[in-house]
Image: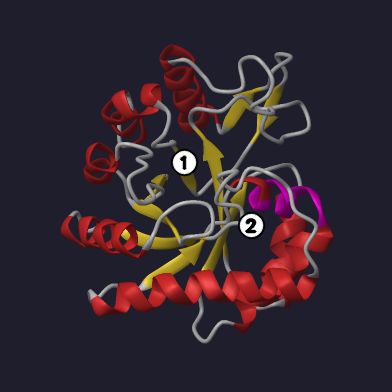
Amino acid sequence: MLMLNCDLGESYGSWKMGRDDEVMPHIDQANIACGFHGGDPLVMEKTLAMAKLNKVMVGAHPAYPDLVGFGRRPMHCSAEEISAFMHYQIAALEGMAQIQGLELAYVKPHGALYNDMMSREAVRAPILKAIADFHKPVRLMLQATPEADQHRAEAATHGIELWFEAFADRCYDDDGKLLSRAKPGAVHTRDKMLAQVEQICGEGSVTTVSGQTLELKPDTLCVHGDNDEGVTAIKEIRSIIYS
């Protein structure tokens, strides 16, 4: 059975992002921002409390240190820098979660860090090492692609377990990566989103931007809380998953 995850807790100060209160009751996993691309201590605290109330699994959602760019701009960081800012963010969320009696279960990088992790071994390797060096076992969530076996083998050398995710609301490129948000059609309309969810659940595949069929074996399905179409359709998405 697929789980349903969402990126949450990305508001910051008086700036609001997403509709977390509408999404949280319908998901299984909350990927909570850790302050580097969105989120602040109060938002993190409130989002964790909301997850606890709704019995939702908690994961850290770390990013490049790019609050102005919402973590969507690639940065050239050393392996040591990546490891350090990963530990900084994961530890912050885990500490706040423990205060509320919650356990951190996994880590899902955000935005450009996620994309770089998927495409560049030089970024993926220090992320894997940072998670392996953390004081307790946590899983890494990454995109289900044709390279899943390779990524699983890399994780195994570090003793890390993975969760692979597919995306309900994003269009796929032919290479299995997400179509750039800068390109038309990168984010699906409601109808296309629901059709993609049905295809993932029923056939274990998605249809790429050029019409090719791409097989995936995801453990969890992501819907974005900053996508109004995704938020309004989330009850239908959950119904498809659990039908």
Residue 160 visible from this viewpoint: no
Q: Is residue 2 left or right of residue 209?
A: left
Q: Residue at x 41, y 70 (%)?
A: 93
Q: Is residue 58 left or right of residue 112?
A: left
Q: Is residue 46 above or below residue 231?
A: below
Looking at the rendered image, the disc whose residue lies closer to the viewer, 2 or 1, is 2
Question: Tag 1, which secondary structure?
Answer: strand
Q: Is residue 128 left or right of residue 162?
A: right
In the picture, residue 210 is in which quadrant? top right
Q: Position of residue 47 (x, y in %)?
A: 28, 56
Q: Tell me where the magenta segment starts and ends, as one range.
A: 113-120
Q: Position of residue 41 (x, y in %)?
A: 35, 65
Viewer-closest of 89 and 124: 89
Q: Position of residue 167 (x, y in %)?
A: 53, 35
Q: Residues within 10 Å of mark 2 (few under 14, many from 20)?
A: many
Q: Position of residue 145 (x, y in %)?
A: 69, 42
In the picture, residue 63 is in which quadrant? bottom right
The overriding secondary structure of the stretch rendered in magenta is helix
Q: Residue furthest left?
A: 53
Q: Residues within 10 Å of mark 1 (few under 14, many from 20)?
A: many
Question: Tag 2, which secondary structure?
Answer: loop
In the picture, residue 78 is in which quadrant? bottom right
Q: Which label number is shown at residue 87?
A: none
**Disc 2 to disc 1, C-alpha distance:** 23 Å
Is residue 114 inside the magenta stretch?
yes
Disc 2 target residue:
64
Disc 1 target residue:
221
Amino acid type of disc 2?
Answer: Tyr
